[in-house]
Amino acid sequence: MKGRGGPRGYVGEIFSSVQGEGPLVGRRQIFIRFAGCSLRCSYCDTRRYWNPRPPECRVEVSPGTGRFRRVRNPLPAGEVVARALDLLTPDLHSVSLTGGEPLEAGDFLVEVASALRNSGIGLYLETNGSRPSTLRRVLPHLRYLSLCLKLRGQVPGEWEGLFEREMECARMACRAGVEAFLKVVIRGRVDLGDFGEICDRLAGLGLPLVLQPATAGGRVVPLRELLPFSRMAAERGVREIALIPQVHRLWGIR
């Protein structure tokens, strides 16, 4: 959608917090959560942002307070950037472009990323890698990339094509020199067979791998169920592996 101030798009929320997943866990970030995701992963813990056109966006009124105002969607890219910059703090590490699925925002995502990069802020994209064509356009603006790979049993519908698109995104990130890592969410032993199916491909990429226990449904995956995944990945040639839970859950942040 186009309008004055560049592309307009739908955002679920804009707020300041700390990164709760992956190698940058604990780093202060501003989060821009783009609305809409079409994958419908079984373990998804942000289903309220599946809707691609929510009528309103929550915007934090002051960094880290947890107090929000609501503004009407769709928003011009320039307004999204301005509201994010209003939340700057001296300890800011980067801005997280998350979702939903940010790549589904297309031109709107690229415009927001370009403007933020011009402000001198490092950008961290969290994506499922389902839209390589959009990633190709946004990569020049990124410093960090979290690529969440889906296992065969975790998403409905056709999986092979999705996985090949994810692999294409990973290869693009490697060529671009972005600080990228792979993430696989583990629901428990049920995922071990499907994980084994992709291990050789992961090793070939040479990227760090984060194994993250699923949290949806209230069950915490025991460590003993995660360790076989780490061992299998190492045996197949993945060199850098970390088991990292969602730390933001400790603070009650959804």
Image (tube, rainbow, N blue to C red):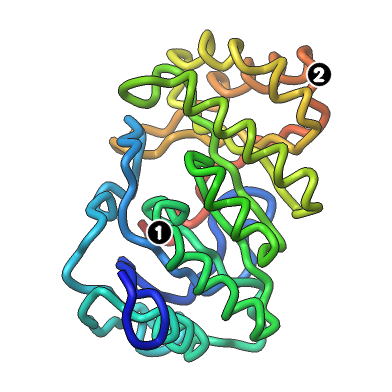
Residue 138, compared with residue 90, is above or below; it is: above
User: Does residue 56 appear left or right of residue 34 in this picture?
Assistant: left
* Residues tagged 1 and 2 counted as in contact (Cβ below 8 A): no
Give the amino acid type for the residue marked by disc 1 in the picture.
Ala
Residue pointed to by mark 1: 105
- Residue 10 in the image: above or below residue 187: below
Q: Position of residue 123 (x, y in %)?
A: 63, 67
Mark 1 and mark 2 lie on one chain; the one further toward the N terminus is: 1
Q: Position of residue 28 (x, y in %)?
A: 60, 72
Please state which of residues 115 and 66 is positioned toward the viewer in this rendering: 115
Residue 13 coordinates in the image, percent (x, y): 34, 70
Rendered residue at 59%/74% (across/down)? 114
Which residue is tagged 2? 237
For the N terminus, give its image quadrant.
bottom left
Dot 1, crowdedness within 10 Å: few (<14), some or many (≥20)?
many
Relative to 146, 53 lies left or right: left
Q: How many numbered discs sit on the rendered protein?
A: 2
